[in-house]
Image: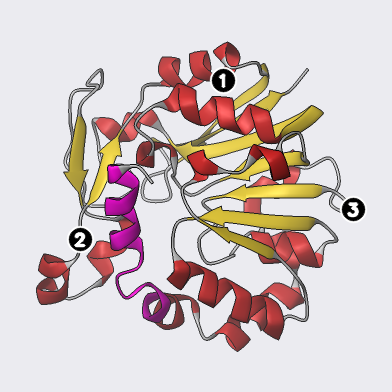
Protein backbone atom coordinates (compact mmCIF):
# COMPACT_ATOMS: atom_id res chain seq x y z
CA UNK A 1 0.00 0.00 0.00
CA UNK A 2 1.26 3.49 -0.86
CA UNK A 3 2.44 5.66 2.04
CA UNK A 4 -0.28 8.23 1.46
CA UNK A 5 -2.92 5.50 1.28
CA UNK A 6 -1.75 4.21 4.65
CA UNK A 7 -2.06 7.73 6.02
CA UNK A 8 -5.57 8.14 4.62
CA UNK A 9 -6.58 4.76 6.01
CA UNK A 10 -5.66 5.91 9.52
CA UNK A 11 -7.84 8.99 9.10
CA UNK A 12 -10.82 7.00 7.79
CA UNK A 13 -10.61 4.46 10.59
CA UNK A 14 -10.60 7.05 13.35
CA UNK A 15 -13.99 6.80 15.09
CA UNK A 16 -15.58 6.15 11.69
CA UNK A 17 -18.15 3.55 12.77
CA UNK A 18 -19.31 5.66 15.70
CA UNK A 19 -19.46 8.69 13.40
CA UNK A 20 -21.84 6.94 11.01
CA UNK A 21 -24.07 5.73 13.84
CA UNK A 22 -24.26 9.23 15.31
CA UNK A 23 -24.75 11.13 12.04
CA UNK A 24 -26.47 8.66 9.72
CA UNK A 25 -28.32 6.53 12.27
CA UNK A 26 -27.95 2.99 13.52
CA UNK A 27 -27.62 0.34 10.80
CA UNK A 28 -31.27 -0.56 11.39
CA UNK A 29 -32.37 3.07 11.05
CA UNK A 30 -30.34 3.55 7.87
CA UNK A 31 -31.69 0.30 6.43
CA UNK A 32 -35.24 1.52 7.00
CA UNK A 33 -34.52 4.74 5.07
CA UNK A 34 -33.06 2.76 2.18
CA UNK A 35 -35.98 0.35 2.05
CA UNK A 36 -38.56 3.15 1.98
CA UNK A 37 -37.29 4.60 -1.30
CA UNK A 38 -33.92 3.32 -2.57
CA UNK A 39 -34.02 5.38 -5.76
CA UNK A 40 -34.56 8.56 -3.77
CA UNK A 41 -31.50 7.67 -1.66
CA UNK A 42 -29.40 7.79 -4.84
CA UNK A 43 -30.41 11.44 -5.25
CA UNK A 44 -29.26 13.06 -8.50
CA UNK A 45 -27.03 10.11 -9.38
CA UNK A 46 -29.98 7.87 -10.27
CA UNK A 47 -30.40 9.69 -13.59
CA UNK A 48 -26.99 8.54 -14.80
CA UNK A 49 -27.81 4.83 -14.62
CA UNK A 50 -29.43 3.31 -17.71
CA UNK A 51 -30.85 0.52 -15.54
CA UNK A 52 -30.26 -1.10 -12.16
CA UNK A 53 -31.46 -4.67 -12.39
CA UNK A 54 -28.71 -7.22 -13.03
CA UNK A 55 -25.80 -4.85 -13.60
CA UNK A 56 -22.40 -5.23 -11.92
CA UNK A 57 -21.38 -1.98 -10.20
CA UNK A 58 -18.02 -1.04 -8.69
CA UNK A 59 -18.67 1.60 -6.05
CA UNK A 60 -15.28 3.28 -5.67
CA UNK A 61 -14.51 4.58 -2.18
CA UNK A 62 -18.08 3.61 -1.33
CA UNK A 63 -17.56 4.38 2.36
CA UNK A 64 -20.53 3.43 4.57
CA UNK A 65 -22.60 2.01 1.72
CA UNK A 66 -24.94 4.99 1.45
CA UNK A 67 -25.22 4.53 -2.33
CA UNK A 68 -24.23 0.86 -2.69
CA UNK A 69 -27.11 -0.44 -0.60
CA UNK A 70 -29.83 1.46 -2.50
CA UNK A 71 -28.28 0.16 -5.73
CA UNK A 72 -28.38 -3.39 -4.38
CA UNK A 73 -32.02 -2.96 -3.36
CA UNK A 74 -32.78 -1.87 -6.92
CA UNK A 75 -31.28 -5.10 -8.24
CA UNK A 76 -27.63 -4.30 -8.92
CA UNK A 77 -24.71 -6.55 -7.98
CA UNK A 78 -22.54 -4.05 -6.09
CA UNK A 79 -18.94 -4.26 -4.90
CA UNK A 80 -17.58 -1.47 -2.73
CA UNK A 81 -13.85 -0.75 -2.88
CA UNK A 82 -12.78 1.32 0.12
CA UNK A 83 -9.81 1.69 2.44
CA UNK A 84 -11.60 1.57 5.80
CA UNK A 85 -12.53 -1.53 7.79
CA UNK A 86 -14.75 0.69 9.94
CA UNK A 87 -16.71 1.83 6.89
CA UNK A 88 -17.09 -1.81 5.89
CA UNK A 89 -18.48 -2.79 9.29
CA UNK A 90 -21.22 -0.17 9.11
CA UNK A 91 -22.08 -0.87 5.46
CA UNK A 92 -22.33 -4.61 5.95
CA UNK A 93 -24.54 -4.20 9.03
CA UNK A 94 -26.86 -1.89 7.09
CA UNK A 95 -27.01 -4.40 4.23
CA UNK A 96 -27.97 -7.20 6.61
CA UNK A 97 -30.64 -5.04 8.24
CA UNK A 98 -32.00 -4.17 4.78
CA UNK A 99 -32.04 -7.87 3.83
CA UNK A 100 -29.80 -7.30 0.83
CA UNK A 101 -26.28 -8.26 -0.21
CA UNK A 102 -23.21 -6.24 -1.18
CA UNK A 103 -19.57 -7.19 -1.64
CA UNK A 104 -16.93 -5.12 0.14
CA UNK A 105 -13.21 -5.13 -0.69
CA UNK A 106 -11.00 -3.26 1.81
CA UNK A 107 -7.73 -1.93 0.42
CA UNK A 108 -6.10 0.64 -1.83
CA UNK A 109 -8.32 1.17 -4.89
CA UNK A 110 -5.20 1.34 -7.05
CA UNK A 111 -4.39 -2.22 -5.99
CA UNK A 112 -7.65 -3.76 -7.23
CA UNK A 113 -6.82 -7.26 -8.47
CA UNK A 114 -7.24 -7.25 -12.25
CA UNK A 115 -7.01 -11.03 -12.37
CA UNK A 116 -10.33 -11.01 -10.52
CA UNK A 117 -11.91 -7.76 -11.60
CA UNK A 118 -10.34 -6.85 -14.96
CA UNK A 119 -13.11 -6.08 -17.47
CA UNK A 120 -15.69 -7.21 -14.90
CA UNK A 121 -18.03 -4.29 -14.19
CA UNK A 122 -20.82 -2.72 -16.23
CA UNK A 123 -20.61 0.50 -14.25
CA UNK A 124 -17.90 2.17 -12.19
CA UNK A 125 -19.52 4.70 -9.86
CA UNK A 126 -18.01 7.21 -7.46
CA UNK A 127 -19.41 10.23 -5.63
CA UNK A 128 -18.88 12.34 -2.56
CA UNK A 129 -15.39 13.64 -3.31
CA UNK A 130 -12.70 11.01 -3.81
CA UNK A 131 -10.32 12.14 -6.55
CA UNK A 132 -8.28 14.27 -4.16
CA UNK A 133 -7.24 11.13 -2.25
CA UNK A 134 -5.22 9.91 -5.26
CA UNK A 135 -1.96 11.66 -6.09
CA UNK A 136 -1.83 10.48 -9.71
CA UNK A 137 -5.16 10.93 -11.47
CA UNK A 138 -3.92 9.13 -14.59
CA UNK A 139 -3.08 6.02 -12.57
CA UNK A 140 -6.54 6.21 -11.04
CA UNK A 141 -8.39 6.60 -14.36
CA UNK A 142 -6.33 3.83 -15.95
CA UNK A 143 -7.48 1.47 -13.18
CA UNK A 144 -11.12 2.53 -13.60
CA UNK A 145 -10.91 1.76 -17.31
CA UNK A 146 -9.27 -1.60 -16.63
CA UNK A 147 -12.08 -2.90 -14.39
CA UNK A 148 -14.85 -1.92 -16.81
CA UNK A 149 -16.28 -4.13 -19.53
CA UNK A 150 -16.14 -2.85 -23.11
CA UNK A 151 -19.09 -0.53 -23.50
CA UNK A 152 -19.16 0.01 -19.73
CA UNK A 153 -19.85 3.35 -18.09
CA UNK A 154 -17.92 5.38 -15.54
CA UNK A 155 -20.02 7.75 -13.45
CA UNK A 156 -17.53 10.07 -11.77
CA UNK A 157 -19.17 12.64 -9.51
CA UNK A 158 -16.89 14.70 -7.33
CA UNK A 159 -16.28 18.05 -5.68
CA UNK A 160 -16.03 20.81 -8.25
CA UNK A 161 -12.46 22.09 -8.76
CA UNK A 162 -13.82 25.55 -7.96
CA UNK A 163 -13.61 24.41 -4.34
CA UNK A 164 -9.82 24.73 -4.62
CA UNK A 165 -10.17 28.50 -4.44
CA UNK A 166 -13.41 28.98 -2.47
CA UNK A 167 -14.83 26.73 0.25
CA UNK A 168 -18.22 26.66 -1.44
CA UNK A 169 -19.20 23.37 0.24
CA UNK A 170 -18.48 24.57 3.77
CA UNK A 171 -15.86 21.94 4.62
CA UNK A 172 -13.68 24.53 6.39
CA UNK A 173 -10.82 23.76 3.99
CA UNK A 174 -8.26 26.42 3.15
CA UNK A 175 -8.34 27.94 -0.31
CA UNK A 176 -5.32 27.57 -2.59
CA UNK A 177 -3.93 28.44 -6.00
CA UNK A 178 -6.33 26.92 -8.53
CA UNK A 179 -3.45 25.66 -10.66
CA UNK A 180 -1.45 24.24 -7.74
CA UNK A 181 -0.20 20.68 -8.18
CA UNK A 182 1.00 20.42 -4.57
CA UNK A 183 0.30 17.43 -2.36
CA UNK A 184 -0.72 18.63 1.10
CA UNK A 185 -2.10 17.44 4.42
CA UNK A 186 -5.55 18.44 5.59
CA UNK A 187 -8.45 17.39 7.75
CA UNK A 188 -10.80 14.71 6.54
CA UNK A 189 -14.19 15.98 5.42
CA UNK A 190 -15.99 14.89 8.61
CA UNK A 191 -13.55 16.47 11.04
CA UNK A 192 -15.74 19.54 11.46
CA UNK A 193 -18.43 17.40 13.12
CA UNK A 194 -16.18 16.45 16.04
CA UNK A 195 -15.40 18.48 19.16
CA UNK A 196 -12.24 20.56 19.06
CA UNK A 197 -10.21 18.25 21.30
CA UNK A 198 -11.01 15.18 19.20
CA UNK A 199 -10.48 17.17 16.04
CA UNK A 200 -6.95 18.13 17.09
CA UNK A 201 -6.02 14.48 17.53
CA UNK A 202 -7.54 13.16 14.32
CA UNK A 203 -5.06 11.87 11.71
CA UNK A 204 -4.75 14.06 8.65
CA UNK A 205 -5.36 12.98 5.06
CA UNK A 206 -2.95 13.49 2.19
CA UNK A 207 -4.55 15.37 -0.70
CA UNK A 208 -3.91 16.38 -4.30
CA UNK A 209 -6.62 18.55 -5.84
CA UNK A 210 -7.18 18.78 -9.59
CA UNK A 211 -8.39 21.36 -12.11
CA UNK A 212 -11.27 20.77 -14.50
CA UNK A 213 -8.88 20.34 -17.42
CA UNK A 214 -6.76 17.79 -15.52
CA UNK A 215 -9.85 15.72 -14.79
CA UNK A 216 -11.32 15.87 -18.29
CA UNK A 217 -7.98 15.24 -20.00
CA UNK A 218 -7.27 12.27 -17.74
CA UNK A 219 -10.65 10.72 -18.54
CA UNK A 220 -10.06 11.11 -22.27
CA UNK A 221 -6.38 10.23 -22.13
CA UNK A 222 -7.01 6.94 -20.33
CA UNK A 223 -9.30 5.43 -22.90
CA UNK A 224 -12.75 6.82 -22.13
CA UNK A 225 -15.08 8.60 -24.48
CA UNK A 226 -16.37 11.58 -22.52
CA UNK A 227 -20.13 11.44 -23.00
CA UNK A 228 -21.28 14.13 -20.62
CA UNK A 229 -19.97 16.67 -18.09
CA UNK A 230 -22.48 18.29 -15.71
CA UNK A 231 -21.86 20.93 -13.07
CA UNK A 232 -24.01 21.03 -9.92
CA UNK A 233 -24.60 23.92 -7.50
CA UNK A 234 -23.19 23.92 -4.01
CA UNK A 235 -25.52 22.78 -1.25
CA UNK A 236 -24.26 25.77 0.77
CA UNK A 237 -24.82 28.42 -1.93
CA UNK A 238 -26.75 27.58 -5.10
CA UNK A 239 -25.07 30.45 -6.93
CA UNK A 240 -21.69 28.70 -6.74
CA UNK A 241 -20.52 25.40 -8.27
CA UNK A 242 -20.12 22.61 -5.72
CA UNK A 243 -19.94 19.33 -7.59
CA UNK A 244 -19.65 17.89 -11.10
CA UNK A 245 -20.52 14.60 -12.76
CA UNK A 246 -18.51 13.24 -15.69
CA UNK A 247 -19.75 10.30 -17.73
CA UNK A 248 -17.11 8.23 -19.53
CA UNK A 249 -17.76 5.25 -21.80
CA UNK A 250 -15.19 2.52 -22.44
CA UNK A 251 -15.25 1.89 -26.22
Q: Are marks 2 and 3 in contact (CB under 8 Å)?
A: no
> In the image, residue 210 lies at what x, y percent?
35, 26
Is disc 1 surrounded by few (<14), some (14 to 19) or many (20+) residues within 10 Å?
Answer: many
> In the image, residue 225 lies at what x, y percent?
69, 16
**Which sits earlier in the primary sequence, circle 2 or circle 3?**
3
Colour pattern: secondary structure
Cα distance in 3D space between marks 2 and 3: 39 Å
Looking at the rendering, which quadrant does residue 166 occupy?
A: top left
Say which mark, if any, is on residue 219.
1
Q: Which residue is mark 2?
A: 203
Say which mark, if any, is on residue 54.
3
Q: Secondary structure at mark 2?
A: loop
Left or right side of 173 for 148: right
Whether residue 41 is visible: no
**Which sits earlier in the primary sequence, circle 1 or circle 3?**
3
Instruction: Please check the rendered image and state whether residue 162 is part of the magenta-colored stretch, yes or no.
Output: no
Residue occupying the point 61% across, 33% down: 144
> In the image, residue 72 lies at what x, y percent?
77, 63
Q: Secondary structure at mark 1?
A: helix
Stretch in magenta:
3-19
Vertical side of 97 occupied by 36: above or below? above
Magenta span: predominant SS is helix
Looking at the rendering, which quadrant does residue 198 occupy?
A: bottom left
Cα distance in 3D space between marks 1 and 2: 31 Å
151 or 106, nearer to the observer: 106
Amino acid sequence: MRDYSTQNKKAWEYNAYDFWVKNAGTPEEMAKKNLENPKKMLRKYAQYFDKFEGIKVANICGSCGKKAIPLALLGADVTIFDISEHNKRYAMEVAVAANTTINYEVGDVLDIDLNQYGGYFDVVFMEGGILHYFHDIDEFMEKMNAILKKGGKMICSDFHPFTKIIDSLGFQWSSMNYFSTDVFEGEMAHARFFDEETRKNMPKCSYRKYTISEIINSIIGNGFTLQRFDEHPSWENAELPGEFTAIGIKP
